Amino acid sequence: MTTNPADPAFTLFADSTKKVTEHLDAYNTVTQLFGPQFPEIRNGFFNIHMTRGIIIQPHWHTNVSEMIFIISGSVITSVFNPFTQKMMSYQVGPGQVSMLPKGWFHWIIALTDDVHLLTIFDQPTPDVVFGSDFLRLTPPEVMHRAYCVPPVTYAQAVAPIRQSTILGPPAGCFEANESSSASVQPNLMPTGWPSYN
């Protein structure tokens, strides 16, 4: 414990809904409870509500492993195994868990409109490297030199990514090609990806 149990301010209670991390709308929110909000906590977690088709965007953690615990709804968790160079994807429902090892690139996609999940870390405060930051802040010239992607093409492709973000897709992303965002159902399990459930 980081505080003295004899201190009058010592508490063993906290509210995981008070610190808002990201808010897309009333149905898609991320709140958190980490060490700075609750010094007595030995782990930390995001408390997440999502609707169908919303994604916790690709990212990785440099200092923690993460356990996904589903309270309601259904999601697909996907993680890139750097040792086998393969994707590992799992359909996860209420009461089930999925593990995301430290340093492994991963994301989560909501399959239903009533998703409520906790992402529980093995440290009180996780470091996060957002895919949105990696993509938008890598100079187009670097992508050209590394992968032969034309700089203008790369700059246009990442132009919609304007800030660090957890939940996606960005507002209006599918509106140019779809009559209704409710009809959007991404190809969640690409051909060739193993599925375990």
Image (tube, rainbow, N blue to C red):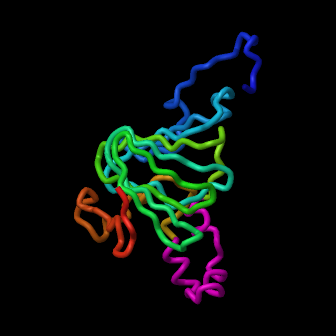
Please tell me which residue lies in front, 112 or 178: 112
Q: Is residue 26 something that shows in the picture?
A: no
Question: Residue 99 at x, y = what percent?
Answer: 51, 51
Q: Residue at x 48, y 58 (%)?
A: 107
**In which quadrant of the rendered view does residue 187 lie?**
bottom left
Q: Is residue 132 magenta?
A: yes
User: Residue at horizontal 43%, vertical 47%?
Assistant: 24
Lateral position of residue 182 relative to residue 41, left or right: left
Residue 93, percent across and down?
A: 34, 46
In the image, residue 86 lies at what x, y percent? 49, 72
Magenta stretch mostly in which secondary structure?
Answer: helix
Can the viewer see residue 176? yes
The mark tally for this picture is 0
Q: Residue 105: where, in percent of width, then height? A: 56, 63
Viewer-side residue, 68 vs 109: 68
Foreground residue among 12 and 174:
12
Q: Quadrant of residue 41?
A: top right
Query: Does 116 lie within the magenta span?
Result: no
Q: Decide which of 153, 111 is in the foreground and name it.
A: 111
Seen at 31% across and 44% down, the residue is 73
Give the answer, above or below, for where 189 lies relative to 110. Answer: below
On screen, residue 135 versus residue 9, left or right, reads: left
Question: For the C terminus, which image quadrant?
Answer: bottom left
- Quarter of the picture containing the N terminus is top right
Residue range corresponding to the magenta coloring: 130-158
In the rendered image, the vertical position of residue 50 relative to residue 154, given as above or below: above
Up-down: is 106 above or below 31?
below
Q: Identify the residue shown where x is 47% and y is 68%.
A: 87
